Amino acid sequence: MDSRELFDLALVVVGGLLAYTETFGFADPRATIREILTILSTLDVRVYLVLSGLFGIVFVGYLVVYLPQRDARTIRP
Protein backbone atom coordinates (compact mmCIF):
# COMPACT_ATOMS: atom_id res chain seq x y z
CA MET A 1 0.00 0.00 0.00
CA ASP A 2 1.08 3.52 -0.72
CA SER A 3 1.69 5.81 2.24
CA ARG A 4 -1.09 8.10 0.99
CA GLU A 5 -3.55 5.20 0.97
CA LEU A 6 -2.61 4.31 4.55
CA PHE A 7 -3.09 7.93 5.59
CA ASP A 8 -6.49 8.07 3.89
CA LEU A 9 -7.51 4.79 5.51
CA ALA A 10 -6.45 6.10 8.92
CA LEU A 11 -8.50 9.26 8.36
CA VAL A 12 -11.56 7.20 7.44
CA VAL A 13 -11.18 5.04 10.55
CA VAL A 14 -10.73 8.05 12.83
CA GLY A 15 -13.68 9.84 11.20
CA GLY A 16 -15.86 6.75 11.60
CA LEU A 17 -14.92 6.39 15.25
CA LEU A 18 -15.61 10.06 15.90
CA ALA A 19 -18.97 9.87 14.14
CA TYR A 20 -19.89 6.74 16.11
CA THR A 21 -18.96 8.23 19.48
CA GLU A 22 -20.68 11.53 18.63
CA THR A 23 -23.87 9.70 17.70
CA PHE A 24 -23.99 6.94 20.33
CA GLY A 25 -21.44 8.00 22.94
CA PHE A 26 -19.46 5.37 24.78
CA ALA A 27 -22.42 3.04 25.22
CA ASP A 28 -22.37 -0.74 24.91
CA PRO A 29 -21.44 -1.48 21.27
CA ARG A 30 -23.62 -4.60 21.13
CA ALA A 31 -26.71 -2.64 22.15
CA THR A 32 -26.04 0.08 19.59
CA ILE A 33 -25.45 -2.47 16.84
CA ARG A 34 -28.80 -4.04 17.72
CA GLU A 35 -30.41 -0.59 17.55
CA ILE A 36 -28.87 0.08 14.14
CA LEU A 37 -30.01 -3.31 12.82
CA THR A 38 -33.51 -2.70 14.19
CA ILE A 39 -33.68 0.67 12.46
CA LEU A 40 -32.45 -0.81 9.17
CA SER A 41 -34.87 -3.72 9.34
CA THR A 42 -37.88 -1.46 9.94
CA LEU A 43 -37.20 0.77 6.92
CA ASP A 44 -39.68 0.59 4.07
CA VAL A 45 -38.76 -1.34 0.94
CA ARG A 46 -38.99 1.87 -1.09
CA VAL A 47 -36.02 3.30 0.81
CA TYR A 48 -33.88 0.33 -0.24
CA LEU A 49 -35.10 0.67 -3.83
CA VAL A 50 -34.17 4.35 -3.95
CA LEU A 51 -30.76 3.71 -2.39
CA SER A 52 -30.01 0.84 -4.76
CA GLY A 53 -31.12 2.99 -7.70
CA LEU A 54 -28.77 5.78 -6.64
CA PHE A 55 -25.96 3.26 -6.24
CA GLY A 56 -26.72 1.91 -9.72
CA ILE A 57 -26.60 5.40 -11.24
CA VAL A 58 -23.25 6.12 -9.61
CA PHE A 59 -21.86 2.74 -10.68
CA VAL A 60 -22.93 3.18 -14.31
CA GLY A 61 -21.48 6.69 -14.30
CA TYR A 62 -18.22 5.22 -13.00
CA LEU A 63 -18.23 2.65 -15.80
CA VAL A 64 -19.13 5.11 -18.53
CA VAL A 65 -17.20 8.23 -17.52
CA TYR A 66 -14.27 7.42 -15.24
CA LEU A 67 -12.96 4.13 -16.59
CA PRO A 68 -12.69 5.25 -20.25
CA GLN A 69 -10.87 8.44 -19.17
CA ARG A 70 -8.45 6.44 -17.05
CA ASP A 71 -7.89 3.97 -19.86
CA ALA A 72 -7.20 6.83 -22.30
CA ARG A 73 -4.51 8.23 -19.97
CA THR A 74 -2.77 4.88 -19.60
CA ILE A 75 0.25 4.58 -21.87
CA ARG A 76 0.48 1.21 -23.54
CA PRO A 77 3.76 -0.15 -24.90
Image: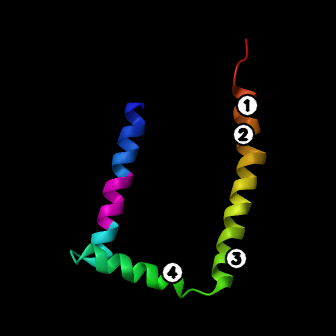
In the rendered image of this protein, does residue 57 appear above or below residue 41?
above
What residue is shown with label 2?
Answer: 67
The quadrant of the rendering that contains the C terminus is: top right
The disc placed on residue 40 is: 4
Q: Is residue 16 magenta?
A: yes
State the extent of the magenta-drawn residues as a range: 12-18
- Identify the residue at image location x=53%, y=88%: 42
Q: Position of residue 50 (x, y in %)?
A: 69, 76
Instruction: Mark 3 vs mark 1: give the one in front.
Output: 3
Q: Position of residue 7 (x, y in %)?
A: 35, 41
Q: Is residue 35 left or right of residue 77?
A: left
Please state which of the two labelled residues, at mark 1 or mark 4, is closer to the viewer. Answer: 4
Question: Whole-Å distance between the Cαs marked 3 and 1?
Answer: 32 Å
Marks 1 and 4 sit apart, C-alpha to C-alpha, by 38 Å
Q: Residue at x 47, y 84 (%)?
A: 39
Q: Earlier in the sequence, mark 2 or mark 4?
A: 4
Residue on which disc 1 sits: 71
Residue displayed at 70% across by 49% down = 62
In the image, residue 1 sits, relative to residue 36, either above or below, namely above
Tell me where residue 55 sits by quadrant. Answer: bottom right
Amino acid type indicated by mark 4: Leu
Amino acid type shown at disc 3:
Leu
Residue to which mark 3 is pinned: 49
Residues at circles 2 and 1 in contact by the CB criterion of under 8 Å: yes
- Pick whichever of labels 3 and 4 is earlier in the sequence: 4
